[in-house]
Image (tube, grey):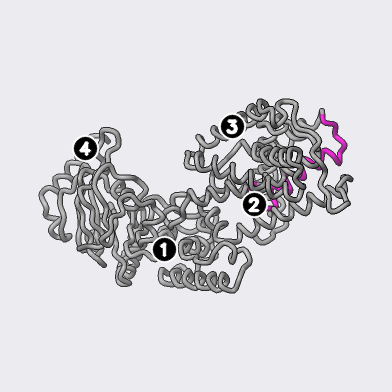
Amino acid sequence: MGILEIRRLSKHFGGLAAVDSVDLEINESEIRGIIGPNGAGKTTLFNVISGFLAPTQGSVIFKGREITQLPVYSRVERGIARTFQLTNLFMELTVFENVYIGYHRNYRQGLLSQFLHTAAARSEYQICYQKTAEILRFMGLTEHQETLAKNLPFGHQRILGVCIALATKPSLLMLDEPVAGMNAEETMRMVELIRKIRDEGITILLVEHDMAAVMNLCERISVLDYGRKIAEGSPDEIKNDKRVIEAYLGSEENNRYHA
Amino acid sequence: MGFIAQYHVRLLTFCAATFWGLGAYASGFFSTKFGVNFWVCLPLSAITTSFFALLIGLLVVRAGWVTFLMISVVIAEVFVEAVGHIGLLGGWDGMGRIPRPAIGSYVFLSKTSYYYLTLGLATVCVLIFMGLYKSAIGKAWTAIGQSSDLAESVGVNIFKYRMIAYVTAGFTSGLSGSLYAHYFGYIAPTSFDIVRSLYVSINAVVGGLGFVISGPIIGSIIIRAVPELLRITDKYQPIFEGLVIILCALFFRKGVMGVLSKYFPLRR
């Protein structure tokens, strides 16, 4: 059984089925990609898994336990972390502070001891500081740690987004278009980092438009179209799948028609 | 400061004076009806106010922020109307003969002695908020203020931290409301109407919303104390206030503290 299982999951917005009874099983320590034309329901699926949206039907099972009804913060406690499609950071804080806040759920000391700044609270802060520094080193952002997030170059901002998610100590990391808008060099760096994270034993589920990056990075790929899963398999299988080609060519024709 | 803490977690409210009034009325009620000592009344009214904040908060904190703002206006209006119709609380005539606080035989009668009492309590409030901002709670507040989605995605229970801000604001409002009641000895529902609440937000905006402790202090000094010093009569005070607000809106978007911190860089 996989680390994450999704059974007959649907999400309707009014009459529109953004996600239509999708089944998905993600194995531990794999890098899984979800692709599909615009409006295929990828981001909606993402939001349902991470708890930002409640599904209309179906269930989400994580590490063998049903989490469909849980609020976002308890999913984080169980080890699901996510990043956002648009760069979403604590812009007015430094890089270091951004990641440090990600450690939020790891504070164990009570309010009173924090208030009085007891030794236990201090040593806890110390540990969080070290962990934060560790993540920044792992992701190669140490030299920027005092920069305000809003002043970082775009590529680094996206990496910082991943750092924040990592600070929650996830076992499943969900990346929403991690290389969108990046140039070739930045994309390559991000792909390497994602591999490196996986090698630490973290399962990765990503939604991406950049086909080259997806084909290069993912071991298995699931394809969505109009909210339904139309194919699943290795990159090579997906490349040659008739339904996938149809879905993509069809949408390209539509785009040309509208343009 | 309570207002800014709430603003920080995106709970913009127009009923700050309502909680202030709750504190004042709780204090007035306990001291005149039951003869409770001021030193008991003070924490009692803070607790009463926090309790009301908890009840109201449980109902409204989940609302979206525009809804929340509108509900806060309703709460402000309902409070004034309701208290005006409760005979036990003196109705529209208000409630009088609230005694001045005393320690043993010493009564805080003079303005100076009351000033120091108020200063002491203000310091307590400042310390409460400073402690909170230093702790994980303050970190969570900052996170929610900067991006609530991202805060949620790293495991911050948004509802919980909004409630903490709401109730803490209720607590300190209760304290100051009680002080107000025992200072003037007389309270009426109209003292706590929505205009008062607007002044709370004006103080915060003028001081600088980004400055959680110093902002509201500086803001209220400018709005309250400067007209006194210049001996401006009540008639002209709104003109002064309007001027300050317009200046802040046009030139000092980060408030007076925003300007000060630019020229006197302190630690953030």
Residue picked out by circle 2: B212
Q: CA distance from mark 1 to mark 2?
A: 27 Å
Q: Circle 3 sits on which residue?
A: B73
Residue at the image point whose x is 23% and y is 48% from the top: A36
In front of the other: label 1 or label 4? Answer: 1
Residue drawn at point x = 50 percent, y = 58 percent: A149
Q: Chain of mark 3?
A: B
What's the residue type where badge 4 is placed?
A: Asn
Percent across and percent down for residue B209 are: 63, 47
Query: In the image, which residues are magenta?
Result: B209-234
State the SS at label 2.
loop
Instruction: Tell me the CA gap for discs 3 and 2.
Output: 23 Å
Q: Is residue B78 left or right of residue B155?
A: right
Which residue is at 21% across, 37% downward? A254
The answer to whether tags 3 and 2 share a subunit is yes
**Mark 4 to mark 2: distance in Å?**
52 Å
Spatial CA span between label 3 and label 4: 49 Å
Q: Position of residue A159 (x, y in %)?
A: 41, 61
Q: Secondary structure at mark 3?
A: helix
* 3D distance between C-alphas at marks 3 and 1: 38 Å
